[in-house]
Amino acid sequence: MADDPQNNTSELTWLHVHVPKAGGSTLRHLMRRNFGDAFYNAASLLETKQYGRVDVREIVRCHPQYKCISDHKFSLDLPYESEFVNVRAFSYVRDPVDRFISRYFFHRHFEEVNCIAQRMSFREFANAELVEQMVHPQTNSQIHFLTCGRSTEDLSLIENSLATGRAYLFPIERFDESCICLEKLYPQSFPDLSYVRSNVSKRDAEISDSERDLVLRYLKIDQPVCDLAEDFLNKTLASTFDSVEERQTALADFKDRCSRRFDNFWPPLKPGQTELPKAYLKAQAEQKAKS
């Protein structure tokens, strides 16, 4: 029987609704490790084109071999009621100012894609995207993204998705706490979510307080979805763990596993072990020689 708090016996298919620049790269590594070949990362070249629930229903019906799919094209408009598959969704949102800054530095150093960030200062970039609106609204609005373009203010679709008990929305700033919830609720799907952070954007400039204020002025409309995610996580923690002590113990154990993990695809070091495995060092040397 698949793990399911709602006692639904059909096997789960997880959909990672990948809000850009909200921790997706690390999550994809974790999903690959936990699901193996049953994980599919749909790398979207056109991020602003999203699937509706009919599209997603057809995707999961046609590809039952995948038990976890990550995509920028998903929103929380999903076929939770599908007769073909037992859908579960999870997504993360991020402080809107930090997310905008991270996206600037990501595109600034992402040579595969031509972006104005590569030839603009941060203030010029913020002016172009926020003041002059030279960008699709979905790119800057997490609410617009999660509602499949329906609104930049109305949270009802997001709230209704969470109310089904089949969707999870977490703040990326509290990633560890979200992980212990998923491990406890769905131990067969997520046996170990300990991690090493990946794809951290390189920063080659300082962002001033006035520049942060400029971004906030235009993106503060996104704050309600971050508050919703905070509230949802708090309620999920309270319902998942019987006591504060149990939660603290689970979190301490999780952080210990993370501290001993040196690679997202190799087992963590054993307690007290300090040297990396020889097989890992050999594999790293061979990879370096090839490159």
Image (cartoon, grey):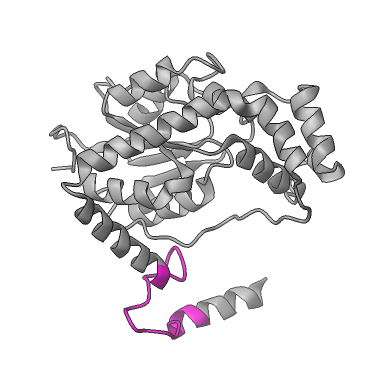
Q: Is residue 251 magenta?
A: no
Residue 140 at x, y percent in the picture: 64, 29
Residue 40 at x, y percent in the picture: 44, 43
Q: Residue at x 43, y 64 (%)?
A: 265
Query: Chief secondary structure of the magenta span?
Result: loop
Q: Residue at x 82, y 38 (%)?
A: 123
Answer whether residue 48 is visible to the viewer in this image: no
**Nearer to me, 291 or 213:** 213
Image quarter of the N terminus: top left
Image quarter of the C terminus: bottom right
Whether 135 is drawn above or below 38: the answer is: above
Residue 76 at x, y percent in the picture: 42, 25
Q: Residue at x 25, y 53 (%)?
A: 247
Whether 20 is drawn above or below 241: the answer is: above
**Nearer to me, 56 or 105:** 105
In the image, the segment drawn in magenta is: 259-281
Q: Is residue 265 magenta?
A: yes
Residue 261 at x, y percent in the picture: 41, 69
Residue 223 image-quadrant placement: top right
Answer whether residue 132 is visible to the viewer in this image: yes
